[in-house]
Amino acid sequence: MDYIIYFAITIGILVFVHEFGHFAAAKLSGMRADIFAIGFGKRLFGWNKISGFTFGDLPKDFDGKGNTDYRLCLLPLGGYVKIAGMVDESFDTDFADKEPQPYEFRAKPTSKKVFVITAGVLMNLLLALIVFWGVNFFQGKQVINTTTIGFVQPDSAADSLGFREGDKILSVNNKKVKNWEDFLSESLINTIGEDIKIKLQRDDETLVLNVPRSKIPEQATEPFVLPAGYNLPTIDSVVEKTPASEAGFHSGDVILKVQNIDIFTRQKATQLISSNKNKAIQITVLRNNDTLNLPVTTSKDGTIGVYIGQEYTGEIDYKSYSFFESFYYGWVDIVRMTEMTFSMLGKVFAGDIEFGKAFGGPIKIAQFAAKSADSGLLSFLYFLALLSLSLALINILPFPVLDGGHLVIILIEGITKKEIPIKIKVAIQNVGFVILLLLMAFIIYNDILNI
């Protein structure tokens, strides 16, 4: 249910922002917008000034007289604005045999057509920029100021590759890294689809370890094969009226030991606690600068009533930005993500990355939306901004049905000073729509396989 709710919220916001761009631009350009739809297909319900709020389809001979029908449709995978005199997703060509009217799309100059067709993409870019600006201005950025590897779990992927606790990472594929964010960017994002070579320093020796791509998570939100140094299990919150609350555990306590066994990961802490069901155990924690030994009795199911996370306890640099600096770095984020997106597309076409692993459909969007929302409002907004940017970049591609496909037709007509026959436009739209549906079916199929 969380997936459904957050998917609906995410898609609803993105589609509304995108289609509002087309809608507002059409109105500003003196065009009629007959329909503003969230979703495709059958009209479930909607409102307009003529008939008010109604359920189901409007009569076939309905005349809005220039008033927009705002509606919700059956298939929640997008939306559209039906602009008078334009061949679009509605495939309405009733206007074809009539003289162009001043309020129609086809009667406007090329400049206004371009403005209307690109306004959706511009609104998605604006949403991404505002969120990136907000993150930079209100939160700034924290940089984990280390490239030293923390505890390496025995028999883990990192252990099998030859990494050891205390190794200092110097470069990834010959690109120098200065902090943990640099390392994650180079290993998870900038080298998508590639095996990587990690140069590191171990005591007085310099080593190069080869890491196959199969050992690296596909999603940048997943932990890499290596934990950052000074990364220890930390209590996120304590549930009231539980053994932990009665024993005096506090949020922020860093777990050092369980039953005098040194702890370096939250998985190990959870394992040791849960393996001692209904027993009195001792947990050593670090609170501020004090080390405390807290006795606690676990419940019958091996829990004590705490949520354990993993927190970096080493040196952190905090960067804050002014109002205008935040806009600049927000735009830098957009440029960086754009370069990465087109780099990934290039690798897909080159066969370096599987198509199904590079693109996600409704199921994957729902999963990421729910996970980001669980991490807090800021995390969800950041995910929304990334998705909005992706929607803008994909929509501007010169593919039929997408805004980029419409833009190509508009530019051709503008250059040749001659309108392309409506039958050809409809044929192009039909072919593009079928390909897009097949593509979506394939992506959803891959989503289901990866659940």
Image: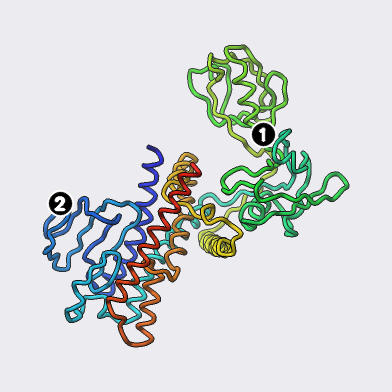
Q: Quadrant of the N terminus?
A: top left
The local crowd at label 2, few if under 14, some if 14 to 19, many if 20 or more residues have their Cα within 10 Å, is some
Q: Residue at x 54, y 52 (%)?
A: 357
Q: Residue 424 sits in which quadrant?
A: bottom left
Viewer-proximal residue among 26 and 88: 88
For this rendering, which residue is in front, 92 or 30? 92
Residue 48 as seen in the image, left or right of residue 429: left
Q: CA distance from mark 1 to mark 2?
A: 57 Å
Residue 421: x, y in percent?
A: 29, 80
Q: Is residue 101 visible?
A: yes
Q: Pick out the residue farthest to the top.
A: 279
Residue at the right extreme of this rendering: 204
Indicate the secondary structure of the residue bearing disc 2.
strand
- Compared across the picture, whether 54 is left or right of 121 comes to left
Q: Are marks 1 and 2 in contact (CB under 8 Å)?
A: no
Q: Dot 1 surroundings within 10 Å: few (below 14), some, or many (20 or more)?
A: many
Residue under the image location 70 percent in, 48 percent down = 145
| Three-letter amino acid code of the residue under disc 1 | Leu
Q: Amino acid at mark 2?
A: Thr
* Closer to the eye: label 1 or 2: 2
Q: Earlier in the sequence, mark 1 or mark 2?
A: 2
Residue 42 vertical position relative to residue 247 in the rendered view, above or below = below
- State the scheme by which the image is colored: rainbow
Quadrant of residue 307 within the rendered picture? top right
Q: Residue at x 62, y 28 (%)?
A: 253
Residue at 29%, 56% in the rendered image:
40
Where residue 210 appears, as percent x and y from the top left, is 75, 51
Work out whether 362 lies above or below 29.
above
Residue 403 spot, x, y in % from top left:
38, 68
Please tell me which residue lies in front, 21 or 295: 21
Residue 232, numbered circle: 1
* Residue on which disc 2 sits: 54
